[in-house]
Image (spheres, rainbow, N blue to C red):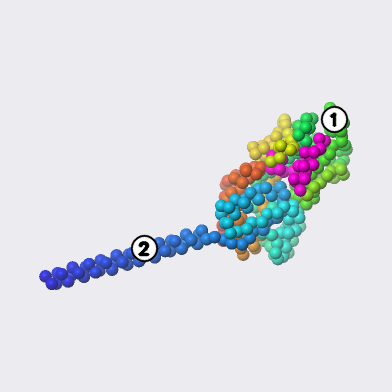
Amino acid sequence: MKRLKFLGLAMITITMLVLAACGNESSTGDSETENKNESASAELEGSVVIDGSGTVYPFMSKMAENYMTNEQENVSVEVSRAGTSAGFKKFLVEEGGTDFNDASRQIKDEEVATAEDLGIEVKELKVALDGLTFVVHPDNDWAEELTQQEVIDIFLASAGKKNWSDVRSDFPNEPIKTYGPNENHGTYEFFWENILDEQDLVAEANLQQEYSTLVDLVSKDKNAIAFFGYGYAVNNKDKVKIVKIDFGNGPVEPNLDTISEDGDYAPFTRPVFTYLNVNMAKEKAQVLDYAIYTMENAAEVASETGFAPLPEEELSAVVTELEGLK
């Protein structure tokens, strides 16, 4: 009996040791899982500095707001709008340049060469599609629809269209007042290079740095016509009137359906970008995290800020590329 009692006690002891060991193993596993989860959701700190295109500014400003509110509240994302070309000068700096440059045109060969000379690896991120939009004063009831050639001739110096009646004989015999963004902006460069085929604008064109200034000027001038991105136009429909453009098959109004690379507004559609300093992304976790967040949420923010979104598969492919930089 004593032997059986001893064996019984021994079995109980062994069972307790095994259970204790399993418990410790389980605790260790839970601890490791918790550590991994904490690491995966670790809060980031520091800053992300962005400059460049005024056209892309509403998109990137909204993206930055969402990121700081919903994703990383300890990261400060600073977004400015010097213009595409001026922004590239701040971006392509040997030390202390911006982390991103927003652009309403693609990077130029000379800018690529500068990046290479400085040892800066640059990654192009196409974020949305924009439609070059023409606007007039709300009381303008004669130029609500114009042909593609008419809007070109209005801004083309060699066309000699001084008065509205020079565009169409039944238009008012009043001087045309032309407005647009200045040479710092990719929108100006897109218009001059792609729409005017690098021919001179009318000498009287009033070119401004701030899009808000253009909206204000047009809203106060019945004979005004201006060009800028669709986002600014649609967000100021109480102050300006969007002109429908006839590309040969009837007048087309720019909107999120017609602004696409194969849509009805395609001749005046262009992609917009942000350019990432890959060197900075590899050095600063918050910069890469913001780049990934931007591409993951580009479609939603584009639609909210007056841009046509890119296909999800195109955006997802870029996210995968960025994840590879980790």
Q: How many C-alpha atoms fall within 10 Å of the one at disc 1: few (<14), some, or many (≥20)?
A: some
Image quarter in which the N terminus is found: bottom left
Residue at mark 1 to residue at mark 2: CA–CA distance: 84 Å
Asked if residue 146 is among those painted magenta in the image, a careful observer would answer no
Asked if residue 215 is among those painted magenta in the image, a careful observer would answer yes
Q: Is residue 308 left or right of residue 212?
A: left
Residue drawn at (39%, 63%), measured in percent from left and top?
Answer: 29
Circle 2 is placed at which residue position? Answer: 26
- Front-most of 19 and 114? 19
Residue span colored magenta:
210-234
Please, what secondary structure does the residue beneath circle 2 have?
helix
Q: Quadrant of residue 214?
A: top right
Residue drawn at (74%, 52%), measured in percent from left and top?
Answer: 83
Please, what secondary structure does the residue beneath circle 1 have?
loop
From the viewer's perspective, is residue 116 above or below residue 66?
below
- Front-most of 243 and 194? 243
Residue drawn at (78%, 32%), measured in percent from left and top?
Answer: 139
Instruction: Specify the amino acid type for callout 2.
Output: Ser
Specify the farthest residue to the top.
170
From the viewer's perspective, is residue 203 above or below residue 82?
above
- Front-most of 266 and 56? 56
> How far across and how far down the image is residue 42, in percent?
52, 61
Q: Earlier in the sequence, mark 1 or mark 2?
A: 2
Residue drawn at (29%, 65%), measured in percent from left and top?
Answer: 19
> How far across and how far down the image is residue 229, in percent?
72, 43
Circle 1 is placed at which residue position? Answer: 172
What count of labels does the image hold? 2
Residue 174 in view here? yes
